[in-house]
Image: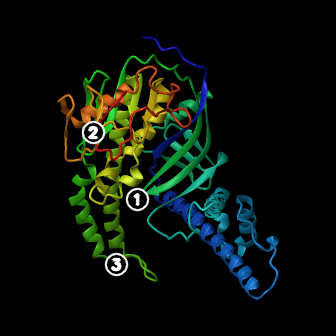
Amino acid sequence: MTIPASAPTVVTQAFTFALDPAPEQASAMLSHVGGSRFAYNALLGLVRDNWDENRTKKDAGLEVTKEDYVSTSHFGLLYLWAEHRDELAPWWAQNGSSTYNDAARRLSKAFTNFHKGRAKFPHFKRRGQGGSVRIVGPAVRLADSHHVTISRIGAVKTYESTRKLYRHLERGTGRIVAATLAQRNGRWSVSFTAQVTRQLPATRTPERIIGVDLGITTLYSGATPDGEHVLEVDNPRHLVKAQRSLAHAQHVASRRQGPRKGVEPSNRWRRANARVQRVHAHVANARSDQIHQVTTRLAKDYDVIVVETLNVKGMVKNHSLAKHISDAGFSEFVRQLEYKTQWYGSTLVKADRFYPSSKTCGRCGTVRATLSLAMRTYACESCGHQVDRDLNAATNLARLGLPGTHSGTGRGGKGKTGSVRPAHPREASTEAHTPVGV
């Protein structure tokens, strides 16, 4: 079936590539990251001293006006840095201007979140094993499909080909907005934020519908509206499998001289801590790779995908399951579906958080009052229907994707995802079983 294409659409997309810098290039990149951290801490110290001085004046009965406070806006902090940089950091010219622009931007955002009550007062950034710096403008660009040119650093080789982004730039269908240079787990990477013109396909006719139930034992269970079990992915438990290697690496690192106030970490601790970071990186990469494979398959093979809206933040408060829930990556699974359904013309529908997909009988529609996690088989007390718990939930979710049962717009993504609020009773504490539709 040929899918008609819609008009070209400009989307913001991230492209991340691992870097293979020479030793002198790695040192220069570390200087950029450290310079951004230093400028952030220096500006925060200047603002805090200004606030403390004004507070002292108020306590002494002196008048303090709005002009007595330094500005915490992005440009206000940049002006403050330009005023004090020569005395605070005589070496500031060794790094690019984006280094200090990034520090002012981050600190300004931190103060905005503080003023709006979304976060606590900004704190000083500790010197650690990694960090990042955001570079904007032409200071970073692709030299070719295997090299990234960074101002003050030069052409840095990449481990992998950058042709996915490079071809967009060659055709004129892509534009680099910014790039983030980061050191994570002992390795360097560059992440480009680019505006790419894509020929998005039109929304497909809802013929192939799947409901996906997320769980711990079985990571993804998928079913069609008629109850056919079409997807089952066991939980690989990446973190649990790596627990022994992680514990050993952490034990070795704990017996080395680590960083503490006034004491530099030993080289043996640095090597031991690098091993710990490599284990964490392996777990994160394996988890991300699996989620990418499953979400791409779903977005390509199905026209409508119905998923649960889970309160992950509340779920991890269960200390018995917190590690396993975090290891599953439920939020990342849904996030990837949101943009991949845009790319492939499918529809993502999110069921309401209180929709009783597990408690509802897939045959007669009766809703149980309670259903413990230990009950892996759903047994309906009304019609006697017995079915696997996850399969029953996936079937109920899939039926929400039938035409006329949801308010989806045909697109995933922010502001366009279908949201289901059916007339089912909420998962509550009612003693009697309430049949749906009565």
Above-or-below relation of 114 to 201: below
Mark 1: amino acid: Gly
Mark 2: amino acid: Arg
Of the two numbered discs 3 and 2 in the rendering, the one whose residue sits closer to the viewer: 2
Above-or-below relation of 72 to 191: below
Q: Nearer the viewer, residue 379 or 198?
A: 379
Element type at marker 2? loop
Which circle marks residue 368 in the picture?
2
Mark 3: amino acid: Gln
| Quadrant where the image shows the C terminus | top left
Of the two numbered discs 2 and 1 in the rendering, the one whose residue sits closer to the viewer: 2
- The residue lying furthest to the top in this view is 1
Where is mark 3, residue-wise? 257
Which circle marks residue 54 in the picture?
none
Residue in the picture at 63% in, 71% down: 44
Residues at marks 3 and 2, CA–CA distance in whole angstroms: 57 Å
Looking at marks 3 and 2 on the same chain, the residue that comes earlier in the sequence is marked by 3
The location of residue 170, given as percent across then percent down, is 59, 30
Where is mark 1, residue-wise? 186
Q: Nearer the viewer, residue 314 or 252?
A: 314
Element type at marker 1? loop
The location of residue 339, given as percent across then percent down, is 49, 34
Q: Nearer the viewer, residue 173 or 71?
A: 71
The location of residue 70, given as percent across then percent down, is 75, 70
Labels 1 and 3 touching (C-beta < 8 A):
no
The location of residue 378, given as percent across then percent down, is 21, 36
Residue in the picture at 50% in, 55% down: 182
Residues at marks 1 and 3, CA–CA distance in whole angstroms: 19 Å
Coloring basis for residues = rainbow
Which image quadrant for residue 269? Answer: bottom left
Label 1: how many Cα within 10 Å (few below 14, some 14–19, many 20+): some
